Amino acid sequence: MDEALPGLLADVLGHAYALASAERSPAAQSYILLLASAARGAVRLGRLGSSASILAVSGPPVPFSVPAHLLSSPPPLASAAPPSEQNVREIRKVLALVMERPQVLTPAAAMEVTAIVAEVATAVLEWAPAIAAHVKVQFSGMAYSSSPMLLHSVLTLFAKFPDAFGAEDERKMARRLASAACEAHRPLPVRLLVLHWLLGSGRFRDSVPGLAKWFYPGMFDPLALKAKKLDCLGFVAATVDSDKVEGGSYGQQTTEFIDDGLVCVSAFRWLPAWSTETSVAFRALHRVLVGAAPHGTNDKGCSGAGELLNSTTFHHFQAMLVDMASEHRSLVPVIADFINRLLACTTHRWVGEQLLRTFDECLLPRLEPGYQLASYYPLFEKIAQNEAVPQLRLIELLTKQMVCLAKKHDPDTELKSWSQGSKVVGICRIMLKHHHSSHIFLPLTHLLVRTIESFPDLEIRDHARYL
C-alpha cells in the first residue's frame, strides 16, 4: 500500500522504527523494508525540513487512518527547505538500522533496500558526508556474492557515491566482474551482463587493460559470450597499442591479444562464409580497428588516425587479412564485405582504402591466373572502384587471366570461360567508370585488344569491343 500511496506511512515513521528495531524473527526483513519505504516517503514529502522530529510518536497508530496530504491536492512545487540538524540525526539513525543486518535480506530485498538507502542518503549527503562511507562499509561485501542482483546493488552505490569509492575499490570491483564472467556455473545472460557492466561503466574502463587474462574466451563458452569477450580483448588491444604509440613499451602484446583471442573461433577459416563463427571473428576485428581509431565527436573525422596507421595493431592486421585471403579463398567475399563496411563509414574510409592498397601490393603478386582466381573477383571489384588504389597490378593480373582462359578453353570449359570472361570485362568496365586517368588507358587498352583478338567466346569479344 505504501508503494501505491507514496507517503502513507510517513507520519508513523517512529512506529515503523520501533517495530523494526524490536523484531528479531525471520519477519525482520519485512519490517526493514517497511521502515525503508516509510523513510523514503518522508524524504520525498520534505519532512526533513520540518522543525518536528520525523521519529516523534504522538500516540498509537490508528488503523485505516489516511494522512491529510493524500486527501488534499498537491501543493505547488517550491524549493525544499534544508533539513534540520535534528532530523539529519534521526534519518541517520533510520539508515543505520536499515543497514544493520544486510545478511537477513534476500537478494531481491537487498536490491530494493540498497536503492532506497541510496536515494535517502543522497538527500542528506551534503549535511552528513559520513553516510557515504557507512553505506560503503555495510554493502560493499555484497560484491562477492553469487547473486547478480547483489552485484547490481553494489554497482548502484558506485554510481550514487563516487567519492566514497577509491581507485583500489574500482580495481577490485572490475576484477570481480571479470571473474564472474568466467564462472561457468552462472547462466549465460548473467555472464553477458557483467561484461556489459564492465565495459559500459566509465569508472571501470581504466581497469580493463589489466584484466586481459580474464577475457580470453574458453573453447566451450557459448558463442555469444565469446563475442562479448572478444569485444573486451579488442578494447584492451586498442588501449595498449595507443599507449605504446605514446611512448610505452608493450612490444607484441597487442598482436598476441588478437591472435590468442581468435583461437576460440579459429574454425571460421574453414567454415562457410555465412557461418556465425565467421561473423563473430570479423566483428571482433572490426571492433579492434574502431577501438584504436574511434569516431570523432566533431567534423574533423577520426581521432587517432595517424597513430593507428603506424601502430603494431594495424600492421599485424594487414598481414593477417592478406594471409587469410591468400590461404582461404572462401573468406574473400567476407573480407570484401568487411572492407566495404569501412569504406561506407566516412570516419574510417581511409582504413578501407589503406587495406585495399595493401591487397594491391601484397596479395596480387601472390595470385596465379586460373579458374580459382574467380574467388578473388569481389575483391578486385573493390580495388577497381577505389580511385586511391593504383590499377596497374590488377590490369596485369587480369591480362594474364584472360590469356590463361584462352589457353585452357575447350568444349568442356565453354561455360566456365564465358562466365569468368564476363566478370573480367565487368571489372574493366568498373575501372573505366571510376578512373579517368591516362595512366591506366594504355595497359587497359592492351587487355581489351588481347581479349578482342584471341578470346574464344564471341560474346565476350563483343563486350570488350564495346568498351
Image: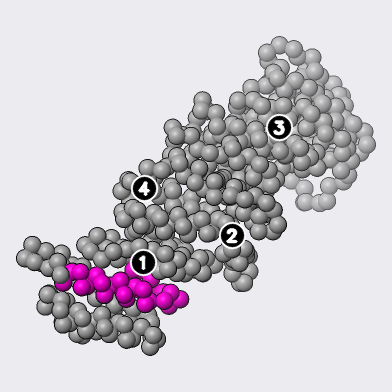
Residue 114 badge: 3
Name the N-terminal-most of marks 1 and 4: 4
In this picture, is 267 found above or below 456?
A: above
> Do tag 3 and tag 1 residues touch (Cβ < 8 Å)?
no
The secondary element bearing badge 1 is classed as: helix
Snapshot quadrant of residue 373: bottom left
Cα gap from disc 1 to disc 2, whole angstroms: 24 Å
**Mark 4 closeness class: few <14, some 14–19, many ≥20 residues within 10 Å:** some
The secondary element bearing badge 2 is classed as: loop
| In front: label 1 or label 2 | 1
Residue 311 badge: 2
Snapshot quadrant of residue 449: bottom left
Cα gap from disc 2 to disc 3, whole angstroms: 45 Å
**Residue type, label 3:** Thr
The secondary element bearing badge 3 is classed as: helix
Q: Main secondary structure of the magenta part?
A: helix
**Residue type, label 2:** Ser
In this picture, is 256 found above or below 54?
A: below
| In front: label 3 or label 4 | 4
Query: Where is mark 4, residue-wise?
Result: 269
Instruction: Return the x and y of residue 55 as percentages of the image width and height.
Output: 85, 27
Query: Where is mark 1, residue-wise?
Result: 364
Left or right? Give the position of 202 relative to 335: right
In this picture, is 457 found above or below 174?
A: below
Name the N-terminal-most of marks 2 and 3: 3
Cα gap from disc 3 to disc 1, whole angstroms: 62 Å
Identified at 48% across, 34% down, the residue is: 218
Identified at 82% across, 26% down, the residue is: 96
In the image, the segment drawn in magenta is 379-406
Identified at 54% across, 34% down, the residue is: 191
